[in-house]
Amino acid sequence: MALISIIQDFHPLNNAKLLDTAEKLRPILHHRIVEPVGAFVLKDRYSPEAEEIEMHRVHHLAMGKGENLCLDFGTHLVGNVTLEFTYTGSHPDAPAYLKLKFAETYKELAENSEDYSGWISQSWIQEEYIHVDVLPAVVELPRRHAFRYLKITTMDTSVKYKLVVRNAECKTVTSADMRKLTPCTHPDPFLQKMDEISLRTLQNCMQDVFEDGPKRDQRLWMGDLRLQALANYCTFRNYDLVRRCLYLFAGSRFPDGRIAACLFTKPTVEADDTWLFDYSLFFVVALEEYMQQTNDEETLKDLYDIAMQQIEITLRYLEFDGTIEKERAANAFLDWNEEMNKSAGALAVLIYALRYARRLARRKNDWSQSSWLDEQLERLKRVARTAYYDEERKCFVSGGEASVITQTWMVLADVLHPDEARALMERSEEFFDCFPMKTPYMHHYYVSALLRVGLKEKALEHMKAYWGSMMETGADTFWEAWDPEHPDDSPYGGAIINSYCHAWSCTPTYLIRSWFTGEKHSDDRL
């Protein structure tokens, strides 16, 4: 079982004023109508083999019991589907019983949901069984789906008639306003395409909040929000949506004031009973980065104390020697590596967040707090080096493990002298086999660490190899979890439940536009 929390009788601490501000920032949603661009029939029910059909023939294709039609909408969409059905043969004397299967990737079409036995609910799999009692009919599906392909299988009709799909369309939904998109033209066509896929990933996750994934979980997660906000600042520049999400996190917290790892927004706003060590600290980071973009003094006034509270609460989890209590460190996410020792990585994230907290204090002219944060920052850097740095191996070791995840976060935390940090990242591949990175989330931070020490070409090479391997596999949007060496891996026990449009995967557009187009990038060393 992965990181999951069940707290009986959990009652979040809600702040009506902050939640009211968040509600006033609810975005306008934008729509467009998209029709299929292609169609095919799978030869067997779960076969990857298909027979292509010209689109003009679809309107005449009659389907009997057990037959299917797959519609290709051309790219990944998020929205509501409307289907128009008619029939051939005699007047229908029984309902048409249909299975609708929505798939984000072609591979999903051939997967059998009955084979899934993972720990996340099967109810997230996008399959619908419907009866159409009267034909002809127009069926508007009430659920929003995230997909490129729609497979329609006729489970049964009757011997008197066959089903015909006359029309299909999707009404897409997003809060991303394409008219406000900052254009980017890169001379490298591969990076240009990577930017476009990254943008589509971000766009499809921008709903009334920054969702982590429009297929699953459709929730606001703090770790995802921080990365989505970075991508948003150099693309759609929807500052109000970032502000809304920050107010939502501040407005519904744990009873002791901690920022929850994620929020439910429907039917009402409610903090989930899941807390992650590193995610609560990213509230501080995301607030400061929002301030960099907007200088929004009202938001700083409203959220400053809550941000500082996250630092103060986290510092209570330190042992006498300055390291983090083991059970608290184990509550850090870092990446989908549940067996990894996270003590050093968690401390590094705390040091990283202290730097942003110090900036917030200076913005607020809270000089006593700034001075106190300076002291904590320098003290914990010394602790990190003393407790975890192996002078002989010239790397950080946590619980006997020298993972690339630990090295990455210690570099981002500026624990080492710049020359030492660069030397460590130059040989970072040495640590890939010790709890390898599983998600684009961690790969983003790895690339960031390479850029931080000046290894720009190495960072670009890694981006092209990692996100590029998704592109070469046919990705329309970037995925939640991806290991090019083990493409069927899933942290949940089955790839069918994976999200193939996921928020934390959208950052290539930020990296490309901030570091590889000649634009000035922000430096957070201060």
Image: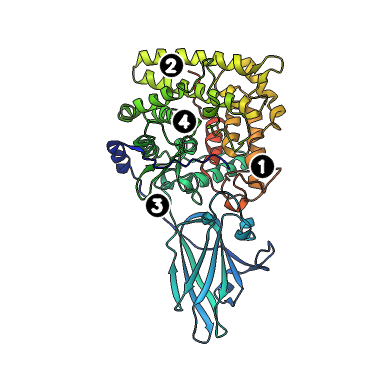
Q: CA distance from mark 4 to mark 1?
A: 25 Å
Label 1 crowding class (10 Å Cα cut-off): few <14, some 14-19, many 20+? some
Q: Secondary structure at mark 2?
A: helix
**Relative image position of residue 139 (x, y in whole percent):** 44, 69
- Identify the residue position indicated by label 3 in the image: 30
Q: Is 328 displayed left or right of 142 in the figure?
A: right
Question: Which dot marks residue 483?
Answer: 1
Q: Is 153 displayed left or right of 369 in the figure?
A: right
Question: Which dot marks residue 282?
Answer: 4
- Identify the residue position indicated by label 2 in the image: 373
Query: Are the residues flagged by discs 4 and 2 in contact, CB closer than 8 Å?
Result: no
Q: CA distance from mark 4 to mark 2?
A: 16 Å
| Callout count | 4
Indicate which disc, 4 or 2, sits on the residue closer to the N terminus: 4
Indicate which disc, 4 or 1, sits on the residue closer to the N terminus: 4
Task: Please tell me which residue lies in front, 163 or 397.
Answer: 397
Q: Is 25 displayed left or right of 143 in the figure?
A: left
Indicate which disc, 1 or 2, sits on the residue closer to the N terminus: 2
